[in-house]
Image (tube, rainbow, N blue to C red):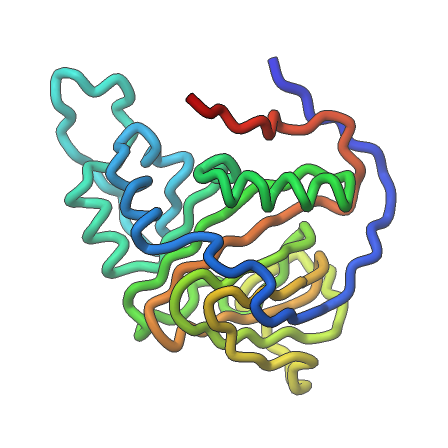
Amino acid sequence: MGMNKLNNFKIKFDIEFKKNYAPNLFSWKELEYLINIRPLMNTKLVHVPGSSSLTWTNDFWAADQNCYPPSLLKKLIETHICYFVNMSRSTKKINNFANEIELKYKSCTDAHIYICKDISITHPFGIHYDFCHNIIVQCEGVTNFKVWDVFMDKNENSNLIIDEPPFLDVEMVPGDAIFIPAYIPHFAESKTPRLSVSFPFPDKKCEYFQDRNWVSI
């Protein structure tokens, strides 16, 4: 059984935007490979905010009854903002990037893949903050990111209202990365169909990490 023991400590992490920080990290074609492996598309890993309860019929050989059928998943991706979690080993490049974060900050990370094909959709979280630090890499398309240099610690962490102008207001293109500390509010607006990968990691030291060895055959 895996373990993920944490020790309290403070990571110094400032708001920062870096151009061309991680070029060619992930692509639409690589996403295509993932979503066509149906066992990976489990409802615990694929999140579709705003979608209603969905049902489908599974075939005789389906080992996991809770995986989205490809045609349904395609429709959801085209009509909703979706994100996939527990994806830090989805490709070798993403796994290596996660490994670099863990080596630098001594804190375990995951990879969340965000997809927005329809730019008319309003971000379901609005202005929000996360409970972990985040490194967000733009992989395809253009996204406007706004970040406020204020520390938020409220019961609600989404659809916030902030009167002051953002500290950072940038157009992210493929390869760009933004560093957002925990509890710092931010907002993402897709200017074109968007594909990005977020690497969250807690403000705590980990003693046990995911196995980052990449199997080559």
The image quarter containing residue 18 is bottom right
Q: Horizontally, is 44 left or right of 51 in the view? A: right
Q: Residue at x 49, y 37 (%)?
A: 86
Q: Residue at x 69, y 53 (%)?
A: 133
Q: Horizontally, is 191 left or right of 63 in the view? A: right
For residue 158, say whether it is visible. yes
Q: Residue furthest front?
A: 217
Horizontal and vertical percent for residue 216? 46, 25
Q: Residue at x 37, y 42 (%)?
A: 46
The N terminus is located in which quarter?
Answer: top right
Q: Horizontally, is 28 left or right of 114 in the view? A: left
Q: Residue at x 46, y 57 (%)?
A: 24
Task: Report the front residue among 39 and 177.
Answer: 177
Q: Horizontally, is 198 left or right of 166 in the view? A: left
The C terminus is located in which quarter?
Answer: top left
Task: Report the front residue among 180 and 90.
Answer: 90
For residue 49, say whether it is visible. no
Horizontal and vertical percent for residue 93? 51, 44
